[in-house]
Amino acid sequence: MSASPLIQAIQARLALAGYSVLPTPFRIAGVEFAFTGAMRGRDGRALDLILLIDTTTGDFGDRDPARVRQRIEALSRALDVTGSRYVVTAILAGAVLAEGIETLSETCRVLQVDGIALNAEGEPVDAVTARQLDDRIRVLLPLTLPEAVTPAQDGSASAIEQLTRVLPTTTNPALVEALIAGSEKGEQAVTDAAALVISGAFTVVPGEIAP
Amino acid sequence: MSELNLQGLDITNFRSIRGHIHAPLDAKVVLVHGENGAGKTSLLSAIELALTGGVQSLLRADPAYAKQLLHRSAEEGSVQLKCLDGGNAREFGVTLTASGLGAASALGEPLAGFFRERTFLPQSLLGQLLQIYQESGNDADSPLARFVGKLLGLDRLDTLEAGLKPFGDVRNVRKNVDGWLEAENEKARLDRLLVDQRKIHSTADEAAKTALAELAVLCKDLGLPTEIAEASLDEVARALEDATDAGEHSELADQQRQLGAIQREITAAQSALPTDGLASHGDAQGAADRYAHWEAEYGGRLSALRQRIDVLLPDASLPSDPEAFSTAALARLRTEQTQLAEQSVRARADIERHAAAQNERDVALKQRDTIDGEVALLSTSAGSLGSAIAELTSFITDDICPVCDRDFSVMNAGSLSDHVHNKVRTLSASAERLLTLGRSRSEAQVTAERLDRELETLAARSLTAEVIAETERRAGAVSTVVSELDGLAAALAEGTLLRTADVAARRIVTESQSRHVSLAAAGETLNTFALSIGAPPLAQGESFEAAVSRLGQQLAGEASRLEGRLTLRRKGVDLVSAVRAAVTRRQEVNERLKADQAAWGRADAGLQGAQVLRDQSNAIRAAVDTVRSSIIRREFNNRLNLLWRDLFVRLAPGEPFVPAFRIPVAETQRLQPKLITEHRDGGDAGGTPGAMLSAGNLNTAALTLFIALHLSVPKELPWLILDDPVQSMDDVHIAHFAALLRTLSKEHGRQVMIAVHDRQLFEYLKLELSPAFPEDSLLTLELSRGSRRDTLCVSRRFAFKEETALLSAA
């Protein structure tokens, strides 16, 4: 049985993300379950069980929301019975009614993939389309964090520290200290602190004879 | 960075937790469940208190919250948090008493700040996030800007920037920095003073130089070998006062008289030539009679006059011939008269100027005193008082004074607002007046000082009254003599004629008798005389007249030379004293200049030092701007928005609009983030999240923003502690949220701690966050309490269990 290009594209993307294909039909608690496709994760996602449902061309009653729900409910009951901790995610590939998703989501996590333009090889036509596909199933994909920054530009170092780092070394340390201390107390405190340090320049230097 | 792991928490009598509970925390995921009021929030805030020494959300609500931390039924309590730092156990904690917090051992900054800002999401903060979305404005003071600014630590930068703003404008600097304006004024005053003094100095210097140059020319003319310089003035003066020339001059006068006598002898001897002896004898008798007659009439007066002139002009050697005498004496006397007149005129002018200058100085001093008086009357704070009162005007609506609440209309002096406006006008006029007065005062001061100096100069050269009187007496005597001489001119001319005639006649007689003897003797005398004055003796065949005139000419030349020299010497002495006066003045000015220069230097150094500091303040302000811009751009555009979008899409895959911050590209004065929504697939931006997203998705946006802020920086503390974050999310989101939590826990090493009140959600999360691999772990804590008993905390640990259900399949 050959799956639809959309199902193939989803499976390819999930395989890339570390999921492996489960042969169907499979049996749980002695009950046989047949789905258009099934995948499971590994490591941190080892408990993820993904069911692929082709709402456009699929077999096993995929095109009938009621039968899809029945099958998934039966699966979850079987999982419950065996004390399994599998978490089921159903991916609905193709158009589907909103109420269908709603009823289904009482039983499991539901993701819907629709309207992804694919080329002849069953791959997304361009980067935008690829991202659209990713967006639909993103919750299953690994999370990529932004590149770590070098400690010198470290955003977590306090803003004041970053400020003191960029100041020229010739800057009067008393002035900087007074300003930073003042910045905790508000604008006026900063102004007053700066004014105090500056007016210090007018006091007679010790050793000089006062006029 | 240390990898701190939470291990366990001991709480005694903290907030709503009564008694002691122990909560193990050593699992990758800790799920806390309890009914509302069971102490979930207390448990989580206990962690914050132990780690940071405070509870920020309570601080915001009540600055004195520390006293409320102890459970109301207890007298003491404590919070102890155990962590594992690599292999080392670390403990944080604080004791609680009824009066507040006791001894604490908390994390230092910046880790504590990281915990507060990026690790712990208390319910109040989530509430605040939502409020921020709904009220977000665009200005820098919007709650959003304040919150994000605070989260990024920008508020202090904003404060610095705003506080340093006044130092960009020198007018504000004058207002804010004590001593700045005074230093500027002092410096300007000294500047003017210095310019004046330098002018005086250069004038004096110029005068000294001119006089010295003149003196040099003069000394060269006089042939004085002395070097002419200010230092050798004494020497020059001594050389000028040398009496040699005067001595020579009087000697020469003697010689001239001698020559005259010789000449007379010779003439007498010659005139006695016996050509017309008898006739001339009669003539001689007549001439003698006529001359005697004239002599009887004028001789007394003439000799008296001559005596007086000798007294007046002791140096002069006047000829004996009446007319020649009169001519020479008149010339000398007129010169003397002119000099005396000039002297007295100058003396009088000096006296008048002295008096006038004194008056002018008195006026200047009085002006200064008047200004001082007025300044003393004007309050220096008039300007600020004026502006303060001006602000009051907006509170004045009727005649009731907003300050004292009395009715102004009883004063019968117009309306209160008119009165206040007038007062403000008066005060601001006073402030302006003060500036004007300051300027006028320094002008008056400079004038007074200039007049003082002039007075000193005048006093130095003023002559005493006696000297002036003497001069005038002398001038009077001279003019009397002159007029008498003028009156006698005709008589003297006649006297001369008569005398000549008489002398001629007598000479004819005598000479005729003694010509040969006399002539020979005279010739001898003349020869001797010529030798004595250093002239060649009589040549062979040279007539007596020629010789006499030759000698006379030589003597006259010598006399005029010596007279010239004497004049030059007098002038030289004058010049020396002029140079001395100029040097003295220059020295005085120099000293004053030195003192003022030092004062100026001090003022200038102060101002320069202050200016350097002011420049640095402005540089700091510029640096603040740069740092802030870089933080904002880095945080928002490159990292936060990308991450936020990813997280948001995870939780709301069906929502086409995703929230984002838009930051103006230009250098920002202050943080002005704008919240927008973007269409997920690109295209134009939508409206604000409040307008574009449903309530559930707004909540999602807030929650994902917090997680994005946590994830967008290096993980200094690998924890995410969330207090009941899913109150209003629908079921779809909760399933996705659970998946996100699992991703964070199992793929990004975050120790996740989450408190929920909903039983169903708790059960669901327990399933979703179950251990997925051997090292994975899950802890659940269930809090409960009764009205009479202590709080109970039941913990359950879930270990990894191999899934077998699917293995049997296929």
Image (cartoon, coloured by chain):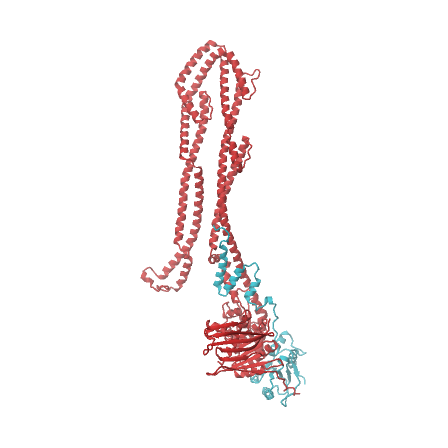
Chain colours: A cyan, B red
How many numbered marks have been drawn onto this rendered protein structure? Answer: 0
Image quarter hosting the C terminus of chain B: bottom right
Res. B134 in view = no
Q: Residue furthest bottom?
A: A30
- Which of B460 and B203 lies nearest the eye of the viewer? B460
Residue A86 found in image quarter: bottom right
Please tell me whether residue A72 is drawn above or below residue B691 in the rendered image: below
Please tell me whether residue B133 is drawn above or below residue B562 in the rendered image: below
Please tell me whether residue A72 is drawn above or below residue B585 in the rendered image: below
Res. B783 in view = yes
- Which of A3 and B646 lies nearest the eye of the viewer? B646
Where's residue A47, x and y in %? 62, 82
Where's residue B277, x and y in %? 47, 9
Where's residue B356, x and y in %? 40, 41
**Residue at 48% in and 53% down:** B183
- Which of B273 and A176 lies nearest the eye of the viewer? A176
**Residue at 52% in and 62% down:** A177
**Residue at 42% in and 57% down:** B383
- Which of B753 and A58 lies nearest the eye of the viewer? B753
Where's residue B734, x and y in %? 55, 80
Image quarter hosting the N terminus of chain B: bottom right
